[in-house]
Image (cartoon, helix red, strand yellow):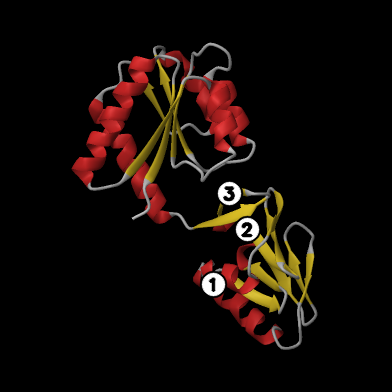
């Protein structure tokens, strides 16, 4: 089982240590491996966040010296819209600032064991239900929700992954990435795999996406793609 990766960011060492201990106790009790990292500043977390695998949960103190938790959350959301995020605070009045960064919870200090455990259970369940692609791009591991992928395009020894937020160039096997994707994806061409949720219509030569892009459809792929498109929206 892949460990649940949790980052705790608070400029109070005692609180960091308390939360680490609670998370490890929950991990033992639930039989769910956890890897906990602690950071004393938002700057330190922001620097590390782009270097390793993505976190499943970020626990951010709202009021810290230097970069505050809300500013940190905004910066993290620029590249990651999906990681669960919760704020640690002494003041419940901050709750409205959490909407813009999709905060999952606010935990009032001192953090209660029951509230933290309920949050960890929720994050664990969300990860079970999610379908992620872990991509190696620009020397970094990046997690992308499959539902955000519009299509894949093979380009020699690399793959262009077109997402709703832009595109990523991945050094990987096109066939290996294709095997990781679910039923919503169908081949349009030997070099293209398209997510049917973004398809508006299919002709014998082109696949038209809702953002205006057009993907070529090969003669051999048209029949299968057209049927997959029909089946996808019949089941929706």
Point out residue 5 in the picture as x, y percentages from the top left corner.
Answer: 41, 41
Residue 100 seen from this side: no
Sequence-first tag of 2 and 1: 2
Residue 169 seen from this side: yes
Q: Secondary structure at mark 1?
A: helix
Residue at left 39%, top 48%? 126
Q: CA distance from mark 3 to mark 2?
A: 13 Å
The N terminus, quarter of image: bottom left
Up the image or down, 200 lies above or below 75; here it is below
User: In front of the other: label 2 or label 1?
Assistant: 1
Q: Which residue is mark 2?
A: 149
Point out residue 129 in the picture as x, y percentages from the top left corner.
Answer: 40, 55
Q: Residue 228, labelled with which disc?
A: none
Residue at left 63%, top 58%? 149
Q: Is residue 35 left or right of residue 65?
A: left
Q: CA distance from mark 3 to mark 1?
A: 18 Å
- Asked if the residue at tag 1 contacts the one at tag 2, i.e. Cβ–Cβ closer than 8 Å, the answer is no
Residue at left 24%, top 27%? 113
Point out residue 20 in the picture as x, y percentages from the top left corner.
Answer: 32, 29
Q: Secondary structure at mark 3?
A: strand
Q: Which residue is mark 3?
A: 142
Residue density around tag 1, few if under 14, some if 14–19, many if 20 or more, within 10 Å: few
Q: Nearer the viewer, residue 171 or 131?
A: 171
Sequence-first tag of 3 and 2: 3
Residue density around tag 3, few if under 14, some if 14–19, many if 20 or more, within 10 Å: many
Q: Secondary structure at mark 2?
A: strand
Q: Which residue is mark 1?
A: 179
Q: Residue furthest front?
A: 139
């Amino acid at each position: 089982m892949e460990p649940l990766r949790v980052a705790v960011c608070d400029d109070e060492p005692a609180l960091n240590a308390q939360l680490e201990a609670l998370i490890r106790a929950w991990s033992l009790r639930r039989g769910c491996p956890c890897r906990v990292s602690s950071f004393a500043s938002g700057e330190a977390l922001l620097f590390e966040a782009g270097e390793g695998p993505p976190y499943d949960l970020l626990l951010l103190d709202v009021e810290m010296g230097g970069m505050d938790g809300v500013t940190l959350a905004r910066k993290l959301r620029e590249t990651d819209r999906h990681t669960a995020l919760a704020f640690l605070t002494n003041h419940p009045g901050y709750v409205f600032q959490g909407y813009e960064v999709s905060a999952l919870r606010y935990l009032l200090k001192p953090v209660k064991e029951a509230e933290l455990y309920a949050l960890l259970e929720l994050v664990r369940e969300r990860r079970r239900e999610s379908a992620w692609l872990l991509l190696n791009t620009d020397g970094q591991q990046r997690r992308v929700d499959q539902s955000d992928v519009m299509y894949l395009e093979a380009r020699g020894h690399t793959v262009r992954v077109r997402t709703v937020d832009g595109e990523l160039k991945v050094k990987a096997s096109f066939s290996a990435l294709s095997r990781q994707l679910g039923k919503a994806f169908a081949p349009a061409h030997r070099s293209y795999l398209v997510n049917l949720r973004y398809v508006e219509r299919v002709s014998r030569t082109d696949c038209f996406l809702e953002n205006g892009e057009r993907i070529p459809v090969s003669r051999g792929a048209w029949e299968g793609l057209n049927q997959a498109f029909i089946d996808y929206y019949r089941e929706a």
